[in-house]
């Protein structure tokens, strides 16, 4: 299973920016949704307490003893809700033996609700009150008079609920709006990278040889260096191939003359000189192959189907090795493509398959195993195989297992170097069929 950390590492830049925006914006929205209602509640509560304090001050200023020594108000209160029964706004003034209350309480009184750990006062309809109280001293009264002014909490809570509902609606709209803006911003900001990606795909497909257009200042140096690298690579490869080709043609003609002249010598002298001539020929072939495997001018655009090449190669070797009655089974998928020039793939598969034809008893199996971005093509045979200690020497230049079998000893070495030039690899192990298994790992198209 893929770990969560690996999943996050593989996230695209767009998804990373989007997730970061979601976490940051979501966090800010949640904090705002929690903090703002608290601030609104505190503001409304403080404002209501201020109004209650004004009423309490008015009551305290008008509270006095009448001619009968009873508590009374000298003037009416300014807030008419004190006169309306069960209005939700109440007051009371009481001493040890007297109780004066607002008409809004009717025949009730402000009392403490039982069953609460904290002190909670309820009004005429048993509604919970937001209240303030104060003890005042009146002339002629030896003991303090406790004045309580309270108002029903329910309207405050209803108002707060409406504010919270509208607040979350506004915050949700704000979240969606800002998120859409961030998505548009990220898309617009990453458009140059998308353009660069499209042009790189065009390079891979061989539709262009350089990256064109204007790019932001952050990408412009990268594009410039990449174009310079592509140009330098193409020019260097072109010159190297021309020089190698010219050198090869210049040497082959004198070498052919020497080969013809040597054949006229005595048998002893011929055997001595022909070995040196063949050695020169092998050196030419080896270094020409290294020059060719340096890559293609359109290295990014090359692609080849191994299944088709295996079929073509096996048809040729079926004729060359018809006397051995070897059967090759091609299990490669028709749609499989690798990022390699056809000629280079033919060289690699040709050398591996020819080696299998030489040593196989009767059967060769070509199959593949896919990885994330690579494919490993296996060429298995049912021949005698080789010892484990010799596996590392197979790809060495000029190494031959059997001098009596025709060959120069360069084939597998060339195949290994071609694979390496395409960021692949070639390895060998004992085959499940009993012979040798060649594993050629290559990059596949996406």
Image (cartoon, rainbow, N blue to C red):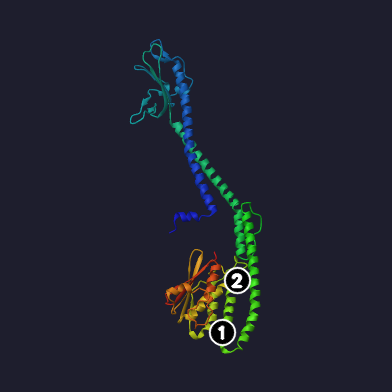
Q: Residue at x 45, y 74 (%)?
A: 390
* Residue 275 horizontal/vertical position (percent): 56, 82
- Mark 2 and mark 1 residues within 8 Å of each other at the beta carbon: no
Name the one closer to the observer, 225 or 26: 225
Dividing the image into 4 quarters, which one contains the N terminus?
bottom left
Q: Residue at x 59, y 73 (%)?
A: 287
SS class, disc 1:
helix
Q: Give the crowd class for mark 1: few <14, some 14-19, many >=20 residues within 10 Å.
A: few
Nearer mark to the viewer, of 2 and 1: 1
Residue for badge 2: 291
Residue for badge 1: 272
In screen coordinates, is 298 left or right of 129?
Answer: right
Dividing the image into 4 quarters, which one contains the C terminus?
bottom right
Q: Residue 23 carries which label?
A: none
Q: Which residue sits furthest top?
A: 67
Q: In which quarter of the image is residue 241?
A: bottom right
SS class, disc 2:
helix
* Residue 152 horizontal/vertical position (percent): 43, 28
Q: How far apart are marks 2 and 1 (CA)?
A: 30 Å
State which tag comes first along the sequence, 2 or 1: 1
């Amino acid at each position: 299973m893929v770990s969560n950390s690996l999943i996050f590492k593989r996230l695209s830049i767009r998804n990373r920016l989007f997730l970061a925006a979601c976490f940051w914006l979501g966090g800010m929205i949640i904090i705002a949704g929690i903090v703002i209602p608290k601030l609104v509640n505190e503001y409304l509560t403080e404002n209501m307490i201020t109004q209650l304090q004004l009423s309490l001050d008015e009551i305290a200023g008008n509270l006095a003893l009448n001619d009968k020594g009873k508590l009374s108000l000298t003037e009416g209160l300014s807030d008419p809700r004190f006169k309306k029964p069960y209005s939700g706004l109440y007051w009371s003034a009481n001493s040890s033996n007297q109780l004066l209350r607002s008409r809004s309480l009717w025949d009730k009184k402000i009392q403490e609700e039982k069953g609460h750990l904290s002190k909670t006062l309820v009004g005429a309809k048993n509604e919970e009150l937001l209240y303030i109280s104060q003890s005042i001293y009146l002339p002629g009264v030896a003991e303090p008079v406790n004045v309580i002014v309270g108002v029903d909490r329910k309207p405050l809570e209803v108002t707060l609920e409406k504010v919270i509902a509208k607040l979350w609606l506004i915050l949700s709209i704000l979240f969606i709006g800002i998120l859409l803006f961030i998505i548009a911003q990220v898309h617009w900001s990453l458009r140059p990278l998308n353009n660069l990606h499209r042009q790189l795909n065009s390079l891979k497909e061989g539709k262009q040889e350089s990256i064109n257009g204007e790019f932001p200042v952050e990408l412009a140096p990268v594009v410039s260096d990449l174009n310079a690298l592509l140009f330098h690579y193409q020019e260097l490869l072109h010159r190297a191939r021309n020089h190698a080709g010219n050198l090869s043609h210049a040497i082959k003609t004198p070498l052919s003359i020497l080969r013809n002249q040597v054949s006229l010598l005595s048998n002893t002298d011929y055997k001595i000189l022909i070995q040196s001539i063949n050695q020169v020929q092998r050196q030419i072939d080896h270094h020409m192959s290294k020059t060719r495997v340096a890559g293609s001018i359109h290295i990014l655009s090359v692609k080849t189907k191994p299944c088709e090449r295996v079929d073509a190669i096996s048809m040729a070797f079926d004729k060359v090795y018809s006397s051995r009655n070897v059967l090759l089974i091609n299990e490669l998928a028709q749609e499989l493509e690798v990022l390699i020039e056809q000629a280079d793939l033919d060289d690699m598969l040709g050398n591996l398959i020819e080696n299998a034809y030489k040593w196989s008893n009767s059967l060769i199996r070509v199959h593949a195993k896919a990885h994330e971005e690579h494919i490993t093509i296996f060429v298995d045979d049912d021949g005698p195989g080789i010892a484990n200690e010799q596996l590392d020497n197979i790809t060495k230049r000029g190494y031959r297992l059997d001098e009596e079998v025709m060959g120069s000893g360069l084939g597998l070495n060339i195949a290994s170097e071609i694979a390496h030039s395409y960021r692949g690899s070639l390895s060998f192990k004992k085959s499940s069929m009993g012979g040798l298994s060649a594993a050629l790992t290559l990059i596949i198209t996406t």
